[in-house]
Image: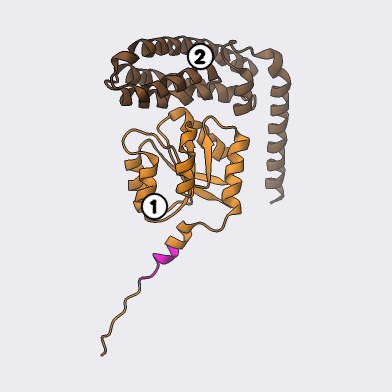
């Protein structure tokens, strides 16, 4: 199984570490890395991914603003150094919350939660995009 | 198909042996500066010294820019954000003491209305970060030599 993801993280060390973890897992494909929300949203408006690794505090908008702007619901794993965001994470139904720095084992536990849950909403979105339905009273 | 299986198995075996040998030698072969918690690095990077060298290099490449953002912050919120960003760098470098200092200062920034009351503590933190950077630079150089010798 391959899970496609993007990383939204302004700290390069953290992003590199996360990329390595994904590579090591053998099941996560990193499609792109963004250091701010604006660029990430722009990408997500054109592309579908299964998972977003999302930092909260970044230059400009924060990670929760990105979640507010999504038109579909990929799985989300928050990566932050601040445990204060745990409540917000719960409110946004994120799959897991990784406090930086985290071990590979902890990363793998988060990924296991993705693997154990039902097929993600992004797939539903993909399917919905295949059709549109128009109701009409017109007759020939 | 058979060839592929053999290659994969050999690859896995090679990794295992490599890991095992690294693990066996780690206790005595590379001594990190006492300010760096080797056990944290080992828990994050599993005794992979090439990887640690890469992480040190990446951190050193970006640290100055983050420090400059911190130094030039004109208001408490900008300063708090700058410290918040730099903080986990030290977690990834096995320096929880500096990380904790950053955390405490970040919390202080939240309660201040202006930058002036924070200036002295900011400068002290910048000095601590500068000293930490020197330690990382030194161990980075040592790691380069160590990893070359191991290759």
Query: Which residue is tagged 1?
Result: A47
- The one nearer the camera, A128 or B103, is B103
Disc marking residue A61: none
Other residues around mark 2 within 10 Å, as few (<14) / some (14–19) / many (≥20): many
Labels 2, 1: one chain: no
Residue A111, x across and y down, in percent: 58, 45
* Residue A128 counted in the magenta span: yes
Which residue appears farthest toward the bottom when viewing the image? A140
In the rendered image of this protein, does residue B4 appear above or below residue A138? above
* Residue B136: mark in rendering: 2
Q: Which residue is drawn at 26% across and 20% down?
A: B74
Q: Mark 2 lies on which chain?
A: B
Q: Residue at x 53, y 12 (%)?
A: B141
Secondary-structure class at tag 2: helix
Chain A: give its colour.
orange
Gap between marks 2 and 1 measured at Cα: 39 Å
Which of the 4 image quadrants contains residue B116? top left
Residue A81: give x, y in percent of width and height.
48, 31
| Letter of the brown chain | B
Q: Residue at x 48, y 12 (%)?
A: B132
Estimate the x, y position of residue B60 in percent, counting from the top left.
45, 18
Residue B95, visible in the rendered structure = no
**Which range is magenta?**
A126-132
- The residue lying toward the viewer, choosing from B107 and B138, is B107
Chain for numbered disc 1: A
Q: Quadrant of the C terminus of chain A?
A: bottom left
Q: Can residue B118 be seen in this view?
A: yes
């Amino acid at each position: 199984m391959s899970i496609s993801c993007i990383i939204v993280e302004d700290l390069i060390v953290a992003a590199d570490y996360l990329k390595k973890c994904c590579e090591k897992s053998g099941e996560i494909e990193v499609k792109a890395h963004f250091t701010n929300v604006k660029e990430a949203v722009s990408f997500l408006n054109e592309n579908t991914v299964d998972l977003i690794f999302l930092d909260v505090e970044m230059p400009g908008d924060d990670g929760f603003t990105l979640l507010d702007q999504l038109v579909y619901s990929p799985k989300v794993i928050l990566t932050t150094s601040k445990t204060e965001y745990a409540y917000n994470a719960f409110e946004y139904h994120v799959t897991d919350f990784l406090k930086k720095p985290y071990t590979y084992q902890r990363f793998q536990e988060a990924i296991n939660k993705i693997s154990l849950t039902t097929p993600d909403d992004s797939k539903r979105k993909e399917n919905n995009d295949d059709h549109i339905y128009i109701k009409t009273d017109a007759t020939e | 198909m058979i060839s592929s299986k053999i290659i994969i198995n050999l690859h896995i075996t090679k990794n295992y042996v490599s890991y095992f040998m690294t693990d066996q030698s780690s206790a005595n072969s590379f001594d990190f500066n006492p300010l760096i918690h080797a056990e944290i690095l080992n828990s994050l990077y599993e005794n992979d010294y090439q990887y640690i060298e890469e992480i040190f290099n990446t951190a050193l490449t970006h640290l100055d820019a983050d420090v400059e953002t911190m130094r030039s912050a004109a208001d408490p919120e900008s300063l708090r954000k700058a410290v918040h960003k730099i903080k986990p760098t030290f977690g990834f470098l096995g320096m929880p003491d500096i990380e904790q200092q950053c955390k405490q200062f970040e919390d202080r920034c939240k309660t201040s209305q202006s930058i002036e009351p924070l200036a002295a503590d900011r400068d002290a933190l910048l000095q601590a970060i500068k000293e930490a950077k020197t330690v990382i630079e030194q161990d980075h150089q040592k790691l380069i030599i160590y990893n070359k010798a191991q290759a």
